[in-house]
Amino acid sequence: MQRKTKKIFDILRIIINVILLIFMILCLTTNKDNYYAIYWIIVPVMLVCETYYLYKWTKVGEWNVDKKDSKAIRYSFDGLTTGTLVLSGLLYLVVMALEMFNKSIKTNPYVIVIVYILFTISILCNLMAVNSANRENKELAEKMYKYKK
């Protein structure tokens, strides 16, 4: 991914996370239905943005410096990012499914805080996976081609 595109995505992720934090605080302090609705609209936007961000990283470069080590780096990246995305999506779907049985689940303060914390942890894990894969590929390329700075 190009640096300009990465910066745009990083800024977008931070903005969405801050907006989600603001609406979480507003939900917890005011108990207005409008704030709850906006909070639960921003959550899937955050999930879609994160999915698209990882999709862009998956497409770029294919990381094929070395057959064995590149595949190990790739599997590690794919495993961590897939796991965090699936768990985030499942969390959101479980909350939406539980809403069918209990209408107040989306307004429960514990659920709101847990969703925010887990989505933030998911973003941090994905950021860690991208940075780790980039660092390991750079080290592998320097080792393969004996390049020193």
Image (cartoon, rainbow, N blue to C red):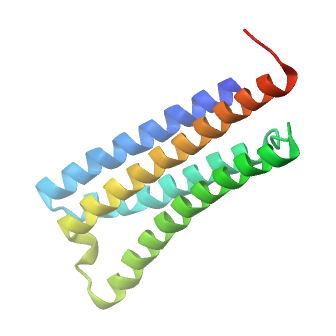
Q: Quadrant of the C terminus?
A: top right
Q: Quadrant of the N terminus?
A: top right
| Relative height, residue 99 to residue 139 (above, below) | below
Q: Residue furthest bottom?
A: 101
Q: Residue at x 56, y 63 (%)?
A: 83
Q: Residue furthest top?
A: 149
Q: Residue at x 25, y 59 (%)?
A: 113
Quadrant of res 62: top right
Q: Residue furthest left?
A: 29
Q: Is residue 1 visible?
A: no
* Image location of residue 131, percent across then percent down: 59, 35
Q: Nearer the viewer, residue 12 or 84?
A: 84
Q: Is residue 131 left or right of residue 2?
A: left
| Relative height, residue 57 to residue 81 (above, below) | above
| Relative height, residue 16 to residue 110 (above, below) | above
Quadrant of res 8: top right
Q: Residue at x 66, y 39 (%)?
A: 133
* Image location of residue 16, percent across then percent down: 43, 44
Q: Residue at x 76, y 11 (%)?
A: 148
* Image location of residue 34, percent across then percent down: 27, 61
